[in-house]
Amino acid sequence: MSMLDAALDLAAADQKIIPCSQKRPTNTGGLRKASSDSAQIIKWFTDNPYLQIGMMMPPGSLAIDCDVRKGGTFERAIEILGPLPPTLQNVSGRGDGGGHWIYAFDGGPISRHHTNGTGIDILVHGYIIVPPSLHHETGKPYEWIHRPIVALPEQARRVLTPVPRIASRTTPLTGKFGPSYYSLEALLHVLNRYPVQGINSALFWTAHRALDSGRGAEYENALVQCAISLGESPHRAKATYSSAAKNRGSR
C-alpha cells in the first residue's frame, strides 16, 4: 500500500494526518494544520510520496512509547506499570522491537515521574509515525500488529495518576524578608504554585531559602516530597536539593 493510500484510509477513519520527514512535520503550521481532508492529504503525498505519515493521537487513547535504545522495552513498561494486555501495536521501523502500544484511555491527568529516564514515554497528545512509513535511518517500514484496542489497566492508571499535592496552609508571604518568608508553610505554598515545568527551579529556590533560615536539614524531606508530588522525579528532586546545599556550603 502506498503512503497516500494509507493516509487516506486513516483520514476516512476520521484520523488527523500530518506529513513528516525524519519524524518531524514538514508542513507550514505544524501540528495545528494536521488534517483529515482528503484533498489536502492528496496534495501532501502527491508532492512527495515518500513522506512519513504522522497520525495525531486519537481522543480517548494513550500510547506507551518504548525506545529500546534508551532501555525502554515493553517488559520494562510492565515492571513499572504492572501487567499490560495485548493491544493494537505499532512496531517501529528501526527494527529493534520498539514502538507504540495503544490503549483506550478516558482522560485525566498523567504523571511521568515513574517513567522518566527509562526510555518509556506516555503519549496522550501529539502524533506518532505510523505504517507503512519508512524509518529514516533503516529504510524499514513501520508495521501494525492488529489487535483490538483494550482499556489501560487500572493498575497502570494508578501508577500514572499524579500524587495529590501536599496540603499546606496558605500562609501569605508577609513581605520579602518577613517572618513567614522562610517558614516551611510559606515555602510549600510557593512550591504548590508552580506547574511541572517550573518545579525544579522552584525547589532549588526554596531549598536556598530553607538553608538561609538555618533549617535546610529540617525542611529537606517535606520540600523534596512536595516537588515529587507535583511531578518531579525522586532522583532529580533529591539531586536538586543536594545541589542547593552544596552551593550554600552547608545545610
Image (tube, rainbow, N blue to C red):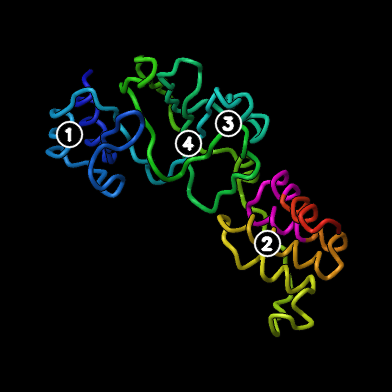
Q: Badge 3, how many Cα within 10 Å: few under 14, some, many 20+?
A: some
Q: In whole angstroms, how far apart are the C-alphas of marks 3 and 4?
A: 14 Å
Q: Badge 1, how many Cα within 10 Å: few under 14, some, many 20+?
A: some
163 with respect to 11 (left or right) = right
Q: Identify the residue under disc 2.
A: 165
Amino acid type for the residue under numbered disc 4: Ala
Q: In whole angstroms, how far apart are the C-alphas of marks 4 and 1?
A: 26 Å
Q: Residue 76's x, y, as percent?
A: 64, 27
Q: Nearer the viewer, mark 2 or mark 3?
A: 3
Q: In whole angstroms, how far apart are the C-alphas of marks 2 and 3?
A: 26 Å
Q: Residue 71's x, y, as percent?
A: 61, 25
Q: Are marks 4 and 1 in contact (CB under 8 Å)?
A: no
Query: Which residue is rendered at x = 72% and y = 63% of the image?
Result: 166
Amino acid type for the residue under numbered disc 3: Gly
Instruction: Identify the image quadrant of residue 49.
Output: top left
Circle on res. 63: 4
251 with respect to 71 (left or right) = right
